[in-house]
Amino acid sequence: MLGSVGHECVRDPAYNWHGLKRGRAEFALFQYTLAGTGRLRAGAREQIVRPGTAMLLHFPDDNQYWLPADSAGWEFIYVCLHGREVARLWRSIETRLGALVEFSPTDAPVTCARRIVTEALADNLTNAFVASALAYELTMHLAAAARTAPAGAHAAALQRACDHAEQNLHLPLTVDTMARQAGFSRYHFTRLFTAHTGLSPAAWLVEQRVREAARLLRGTSLPLKEIAARCGFPDANYLSRVFRRHSGMPPGAYRRSGA
């Protein structure tokens, strides 16, 4: 279903959104830049957000976007989407397309997003069924773009390694484990994985563990020791150090804040 929708031109240098400080609810974001520039950090990778590019993000997650000091402004349209099916599809879309992807103004995801924004600003989306249908349509356009994107000969093997890791975060996974799942040597796997995602396999694993820890902190009352075990951290102290480094706050403060 649709969440917030809009068309903005940001000039305030205080504009800054952190993906682990946006509340407990899970949602996805499509934000297409029309003019100006922004800055995006997805995990450890920073990129300039230019006109003709769309940010594909989900929350809570270790990402951040802001108006950089050298930007005179940043104009964009955005659509937030909620729902279990959207969340399921969005992860595979992000994995295939990345957090920042180029689209022409006439590409289906952009024209669909523009239509959603236009209808919302005209107050024409009062019918929940129509709004949900548009949210699903945008998601399907992005899924189609992900399916047809050039993926390279090794994409399926890399995805297999990622899927196995995401389903077994409680285990002592290593880069060697992921390489075996993909059917490559550690060296070859690391090179391919980094080229495909912009992150090393080790950094990606840490990101997934922090993401799962944030989900459990947000949605359960499990003690920190149990969350550490479920996310593959050796103990609660180690989880606390890593979580603070990624989110800017310790796990206890994150849970109490309702972020």
Image (spheres, rainbow, N blue to C red):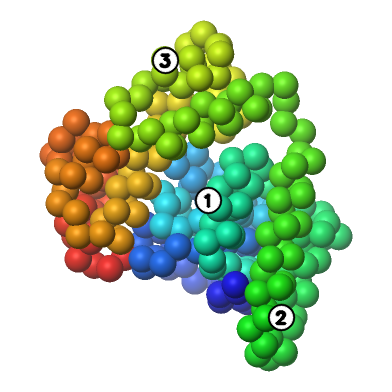
Which residue is denoted by mark 1 in the rendering?
Answer: 40
Q: Is residue 169 above or below residue 63?
A: above
Closest to the observer, 92 or 191: 92
> Mark 3 or 1, which is nearer the eye?
3
- The residue carrying pointer 2 sits among few (fewer than 14), some (14 to 19) or many (20 or more) residues within 10 Å by Cα, namely some
Q: Residue at x 77, y 33 (%)?
A: 150
Quarter holding residue 254: bottom left
Horizontal arrangement in the rendering, residue 89 relative to residue 143 (left or right): left
Residue 146 horizontal/vertical position (percent): 72, 44
Question: Residue sitting at 61 percent across and 23 percent down?
Answer: 157
Q: Earlier in the sequence, mark 3 or mark 2?
A: 2
Residue displayed at 66% across by 27% down: 155
Residue 12 location, x and y as percent?
49, 71
Which image quarter holds the N terminus? Answer: bottom right
Q: Amino acid at mark 2?
A: Val
Q: Give whichever of 44, 222 is nearer the camera.
A: 222
Per the image, label 1 sits on a secondary structure element best described as: strand
Q: Which residue is mark 2?
A: 130
How would you rate the neighbour count of disc 1 (Cα within 10 Å): few for under 14, some for 14-19, many for 20 or more? Answer: many
For marks 3 and 2, give the one nearer the viewer.
Answer: 2
- Classify the position of the C terminus by image quarter: bottom left
SS category of the residue bearing label 3 = helix
| SS at badge 2 | helix
* Cα distance between the residues tagged 3 and 2: 47 Å
